[in-house]
Image (cartoon, rainbow, N blue to C red):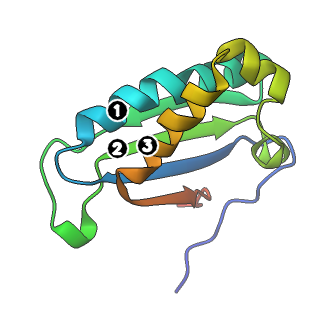
Amino acid sequence: MTPDLAEPSQDARYVVEYYYKVRWGHQEEFLRLFRKNHVPVLARETETGRILEVVAAAPRYHATEDGRWDYRVTIAFRDAAAAAAPPLGEEEMRALFPDKAAFEREEQRRFEILDAHWDVPLVGLSLG
């Protein structure tokens, strides 16, 4: 039997969990690049109201390799439309990162050291 899904409203926040599995030995490099290049984007999108909350977590202990993930970032968007909207525009990105070539190089590196990355949009469940 499938549990009842909560009825989403048009103005309900939309939550997505982003999982990152990093190649062994590169966890600190990934986190440094994430903090440097992605956290400012998330902060700016929070200022604009597109994002309501960002929470990051790492597992305390290791898991089996097939179930391993290193970092989970949970983002609560204002609503589903905000989640689907385009990210920051070119002008805003240039204001955050004047050296576009360095930013692109570092972002490429951040994804090169990933073994896997997946996104999980969440749906509320009715338990009553």
In primary-sequence order, the first of circles 2 and 1 is: 1
Q: How many marks?
A: 3
Residue 83: x percent and y percent? 75, 45
Position above or below: 92 against 59 = above
In primary-sequence order, the first of circles 3 and 2 is: 2
Q: Is residue 128 visible?
A: no
Q: Is residue 34 left or right of residue 47?
A: left
Q: Amino acid at mark 2?
A: Tyr
How much space separates mark 3 and mark 2, taking CA atoms? Answer: 17 Å
Q: Is residue 30 left or right of residue 4?
A: left
Position above or below: 13 against 52 = below
CB atoms at circles 2 and 1 under 8 Å apart? yes
**Quadrant of residue 48 in the image?**
top right
In primary-sequence order, the first of circles 1 and 3 is: 1
Q: Is residue 40 visible?
A: yes
What secondary structure is marked by label 2? strand
Q: Amino acid at mark 1?
A: Leu
Q: Which mark is residue 109?
A: 3
Report the residue marked by disc 2: 71
Q: Nearer the viewer, mark 1 or mark 3?
A: 3
Report the residue marked by disc 1: 31
What secondary structure is marked by label 1? helix
Q: Name the residue rendered at 12%, 47% in the picture.
A: 61
How much space separates mark 2 and mark 1, taking CA atoms? Answer: 9 Å
Residue 88: x percent and y percent? 78, 30
How much space separates mark 1 and mark 3, taking CA atoms? Answer: 12 Å
Q: Name the residue rendered at 48%, 34% in the picture.
A: 106
Say few, some or many: other residues with alpha carbon within 10 Å of mark 1 (under 14 / 14 to 19 / 20 or more). Answer: some
